[in-house]
């Protein structure tokens, strides 16, 4: 058998998602994590709507949602270790209604999430090779030669066309490429604990913000436990060994809970860094290997998954000779810009929330409640916050792959969803392939051109949903395999479409979808407002 063309180093959420993106497109890969088995630590707790939309493309979203807990309400508390009280309750219900088939955030611990992906990869014939550590690699004329040390003691020299460093913050791939990882480390020490509490399992989210205080409590459906994440009191943060009992008296009053059972407890420091580059030749950085930031906002894991989705379809198309190699040049500019802005925003938010002095106090006591107050009352405010936190706002305006504007939709934007009451324009995205969308009437020339190019063409009826989404009547939208708009043209210009296709040497394949999408697939996409829970 020829060697798999893609070597994925690491099987965290980024590596597993990259493997999924390749395997679902029939591209073989090897997945080699140093770890001996799946992660036991839950770490990331929140799966954002944009990530669920990607899982919707694979037909996996319904299962993921079933295994997690849809976060409906957040209880904001105030007060210290001497006692606290609830000052605000924020409803997340319908926060993103009409914007996404998944108008909520999902609490789904990272360890459960990783096991789910491992299971799905296994079903697709891709086995994770546990206990296989990358120790070195070099690029040669036609590919990569990597040295892998197996936990059995065997040392292997492996060949591949590409190597993808999904190997976390201490990435061997990044270090071998001698790339800088500038940034810093926050002074504060975080704790994370899995606990049972005296009152019954709560599906809600609890937050306590105060001077030197940041404490969160999430639900974990699979174990019926609660996840606690927060800041260790500064007077204890320099201790050599710290256990849950050392901080129990500090935590319990903050959330008004009594912990009856402890599953695990750990402490960690948070960094904020972005690598100088995400690609050198045939080597790529994905996820924490390329960027790390504070957990404020629940963005880290979701950003790594977004990287993997972005890179996966591009490598697949290049390996299948369905696009020129220049397609791979678009990965770094599309993802590094977002990583840099995310690191600076989470840095500002984190420093504002937990920092010393007036700025921190002001953010916690005045800005945060105001923001949440607006967010709970007015739909535009709620939608704006949802778009940002859910990662729906991520777009690639400066990418070489982005061109034109039609209606409110620019080349590089996420294809807007047309809502539960319109024909479901996300349904065809399940082909995981390029496609043309027209909302209104399609002209004969475009129909002929799409036929000749083997480009699937989907025509949708106009509706309030298409109008609200900002899609322009009769415009042409060329949609990428990851659901972003590449080309947005007011006119159905066949020559512009053909020039774009030529520029990237794209070759399309007709898919099994019907020309006209006449139904909503409620089974998978239909987590509309009435079906949630
Ligand atoms: C407490 C905590 C809470 C968090 N909360 C959130 C949240 O709510 N939302 C969110 O989005 N993010 C959150 N994050 C961040 C999130 O956990 C990370 O962003 C995510 O794990 C990154 O995934 P990854 O696959 O890139 O890397 P990792 O999960 O770090 O995986 C790295 C993989 O590489 C392997 N590896 C390492 N070196 C080698 C080598 N030399 N050879 C082979 N394999 C190797 C490891 O075995 C592992 O499989 C949180 C993080 C922490 C610590």
Image (cartoon, helix red, strand yellow):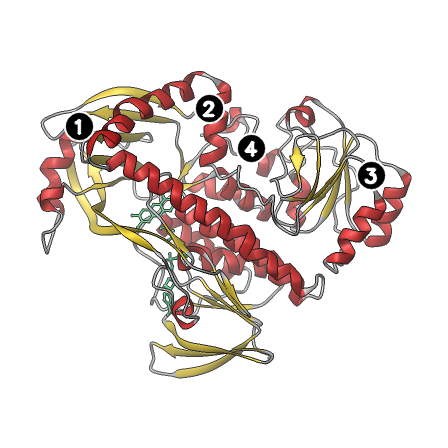
Disc number placed over residue 492 in the picture, else none? 3
Q: Is 180 drawn above or below residue 357 in the view shown? A: below
Crowd rating for badge 1 (residues with CA inside 10 Å; few <14, some 14–19, many 20+): some
Q: Earlier in the sequence, mark 1 or mark 2?
A: 1
Mark toward the viewer: 1 or 3: 3
Seen from the viewer's position, the closer of residues 129 and 452 is: 452
* Secondary structure at numbered mark 4: loop
Q: Earlier in the sequence, mark 1 or mark 3?
A: 1
Disc number placed over residue 388 in the picture, else none? none
Q: Is residue 356 visible?
A: yes
Crowd rating for badge 3 (residues with CA inside 10 Å; few <14, some 14–19, many 20+): many
Gap between marks 4 and 2, in whole Å?
13 Å
Q: Which residue is mark 1?
A: 256
* Secondary structure at numbered mark 3: loop
Crowd rating for badge 4 (residues with CA inside 10 Å; few <14, some 14–19, many 20+): many
Q: Are marks 4 and 2 in contact (CB under 8 Å)?
A: no
Q: How many marks?
A: 4
Gap between marks 4 and 1, in whole Å?
35 Å
Mark toward the viewer: 1 or 2: 2
Q: Earlier in the sequence, mark 4 or mark 3?
A: 4
Q: Quadrant of the N terminus?
A: bottom right
The percent coordinates of residue 203 (x first, y second) are 33, 31
Gap between marks 1 and 2, in whole Å?
28 Å
Q: Which residue is mark 4?
A: 100
Gap between marks 4 and 3, in whole Å?
27 Å
The percent coordinates of residue 135 (x first, y second) are 38, 76
Say whether residue 352 is left or right of residue 291. left
Q: Are marks 1 and 3 in contact (CB under 8 Å)?
A: no
């Amino acid at each position: 058998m020829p060697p798999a063309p893609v070597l994925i180093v690491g099987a965290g959420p980024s590596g597993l998602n990259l493997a999924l993106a390749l395997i679902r497109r029939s591209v073989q890969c090897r997945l080699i994590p140093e770890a001996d088995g799946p992660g036991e630590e839950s770490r990331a707790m929140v799966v954002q709507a944009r990530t669920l939309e990607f899982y919707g493309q694979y037909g996996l979203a319904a299962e993921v949602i079933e295994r997690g807990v849809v976060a409906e309400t957040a209880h904001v508390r105030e007060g210290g270790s001497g006692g606290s009280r609830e000052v605000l309750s924020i409803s997340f219900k319908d926060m993103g209604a009409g914007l996404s088939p998944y108008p909520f955030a999902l609490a789904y611990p990272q360890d459960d999430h990783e096991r789910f992906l491992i299971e799905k990869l296994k079903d697709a014939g891709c086995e994770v090779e546990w206990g296989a550590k990358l120790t070195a690699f070099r690029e040669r004329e036609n590919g990569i030669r990597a040295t892998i040390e197996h936990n059995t003691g065997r040392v292997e020299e492996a060949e591949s066309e590409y190597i993808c460093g999904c190997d976390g913050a201490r990435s061997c791939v990044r270090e071998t490429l001698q790339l800088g990882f500038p940034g810093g480390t926050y002074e504060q020490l975080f704790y994370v604990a899995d606990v049972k509490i005296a009152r019954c399992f709560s599906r809600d989210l609890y937050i306590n913000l105060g001077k030197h205080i940041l404490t969160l409590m999430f639900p974990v459906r699979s174990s019926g436990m609660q996840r606690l994440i927060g800041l260790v009191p500064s007077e204890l943060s320099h201790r050599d060994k710290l256990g849950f009992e050392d901080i129990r008296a500090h935590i319990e009053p903050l959330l008004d809970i009594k912990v009856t059972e402890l599953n695990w407890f750990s402490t960690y420091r948070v960094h904020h860094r972005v690598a100088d580059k995400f690609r050198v030749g045939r080597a790529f950085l994905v996820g924490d290997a390329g960027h790390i930031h504070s957990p404020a906002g629940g963005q880290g894991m979701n950003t790594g998954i977004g990287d993997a989705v972005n890179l996966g379809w591009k490598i697949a198309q290049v390996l299948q000779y369905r696009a020129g190699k220049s397609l791979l040049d678009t990965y770094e500019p599309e993802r590094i810009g977002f990583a840099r802005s995310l690191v600076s925003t989470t840095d500002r938010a984190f420093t504002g929330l937990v920092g010393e002095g007036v700025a921190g106090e002001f953010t916690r006591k005045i800005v945060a409640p105001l923001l949440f107050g607006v967010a709970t009352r007015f739909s535009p405010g709620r939608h704006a916050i949802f778009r940002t936190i859910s990662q729906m706002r991520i777009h690639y305006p400066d990418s070489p792959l982005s061109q034109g504007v039609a209606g409110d939709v620019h080349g590089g934007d996420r294809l807007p969803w047309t809502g539960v009451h319109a024909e479901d324009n996300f349904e065809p995205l399940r082909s995981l392939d390029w496609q043309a969308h027209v909302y209104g009437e399609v002209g004969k020339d475009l129909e002929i051109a799409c036929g000749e190019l083997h480009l699937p063409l989907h025509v949708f009826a106009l509706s309030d949903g298409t109008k609200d989404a900002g899609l322009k009547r009769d415009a042409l939208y060329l949609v990428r395999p990851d659901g972003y708009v590449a080309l947005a043209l007011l006119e159905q210009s066949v020559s512009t479409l053909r020039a774009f296709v030529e520029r990237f040497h794209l070759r399309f394949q007709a898919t099994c979808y019907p020309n006209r999408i006449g139904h909503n697939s409620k089974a998978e996409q239909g987590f509309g407002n009435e079906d949630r829970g």
